[in-house]
Amino acid sequence: MYLHPEFEKLTRSEIEVLQLERLKKTVNRCMNTEFYRKRFAENNITPDDIRSLSDLYKIPFTTKQDLRESYPFKMSTVPLSQVVRLHSSSGTTGTPTVILHTQKDLDEWANAVARCLYMVGLRPGDIFQNSSGYGMFTGGLGFQYGAERLGMLTVPAAAGNTKRQIKFITDFGTTALHAIPSYAGRLYEVMEEMGIDPRRDTRLHTLIIGAEPHSEEQRRRIEKMLGVKAYNSFGMSEMCGPGVAFECQEQNGLHIWEDYYIVEIVNPDTLEPVKDGEIGELVLTTINREAMPLLRYRTRDLTRILPGSCPCGRHHKRLDRMKGRSDDMMILKGVNIFPIQIETILMQFPELGNDYLITLTNEEANDLMTVEVELKEFSDDYHRLQALTKEITRQLKDEILITPIVRLVSKGSLPKQEGKAIRVKDLRKTLI
């Protein structure tokens, strides 16, 4: 069962006392690795220099490249005989990253995910279906063990096979579903084709979404389609997986569990801290992990700390939804653009479906952006489609400051993915 619910309601002073205690222990544990011993020596610091939370800045950043260069086990702080599981990135380009877990790490992870699910109102008696991939990807097992820890009946449906997913939802009386936002839209489309009304024909009331950036407009559209409350989640394999931060029932920011992590937001260019409320790169330090703690890990995710308190009564800091990744940013004609900016505009048009594709090309020295977006319903009204295209183009230009080529395509014509949606194709060639 879900353990230590009292940690949800810690006061700010209690959080900071606990963080400092755990940070000191973590720093000392990191000295078991050659990587951190060398990194501390190079910067003329020792564990004794970390006397307060404000001393955290003395510690250099850890990056994904550091993890790759330490592949596979060089950052373990315990003997491999104490490690019971590893997870790895896909490694489709270059060396993958590996994260190691002791049994205590897995227990703490399960409890963190259970805390998240409890926070949004799920309880024993709910039926939780997980449409996430299992295996090396952390979303499957992370939510599986968290849901079990909470005491729910779990359906490990895994990714794909949409009609089977829907059969499980209807036959088993699934009340809570975990799915990435783009796949939630796909589920609804297939339900429509099968003549199933999720509001009438299912018991769904809660949807957990995450793993890919999505706009508030996309969330509200999903809620309306499926008749659920959709809660945003954030996790990453380097931090264990899901359960790092989660929305409460207020849906006004993701509470990051500060008894597990110390959070910083820095300017991704200067690496200097930014003020609360300003967007920057999320940096996380693990303070409750045995096998492979990470100090000041640069996530590359862009977000901000939301100022003020939450009506739910929890005092853990809140993160805004992820704006994208610093390495996902598109630069066209000197303008910085994130895919979520485009999605925010597209989702405001009820005539449009859920799927879109941004293609970047260049002609001579001119960068071009083409935005293909599916229509919700077929239409052969040329003048209506022309007016709609013109208005979408206008609003996109106002948002991203360049004029894209907008193409309205028929429903189902864009490629479908069972996993994370591919939203951007950069076909630009380097011009010499």
Image (spheres, rainbow, N blue to C red):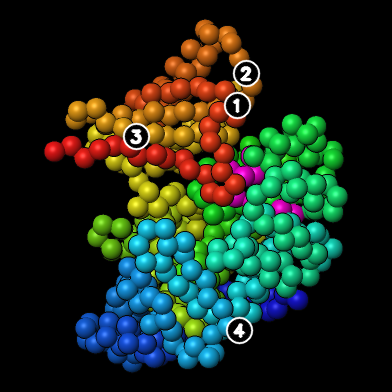
- Marks 1 and 4, Cα distance to the nearest angstrom? 47 Å
| Label 2: element kind | loop
Q: In front: 300, or 320?
A: 300
Looking at the image, which residue is at 49% across and 88% down? 80
Q: Which mark is residue 411?
A: 1
Q: CA distance from mark 2 to mark 4?
A: 53 Å
Q: Which residue is mark 4?
A: 103
Does residue 185 sit above or below 43 in this rendering? above
Q: Residue furthest left?
A: 432
Query: Quick one: label 1 or label 4, which is nearer the N terminus?
Result: 4
Residue indicated by mark 3: 360
Q: Is residue 254 visible?
A: no
Vertical placement of residue 185 versus 323, above or below: above
Image position of 313 (left or right of 80) = right
Q: Amino acid at mark 2?
A: Phe
Q: In this rendering, would 41 be left or right of 141?
A: left
Whether residue 361 is situated above or below residue 203 in the rendered picture: above
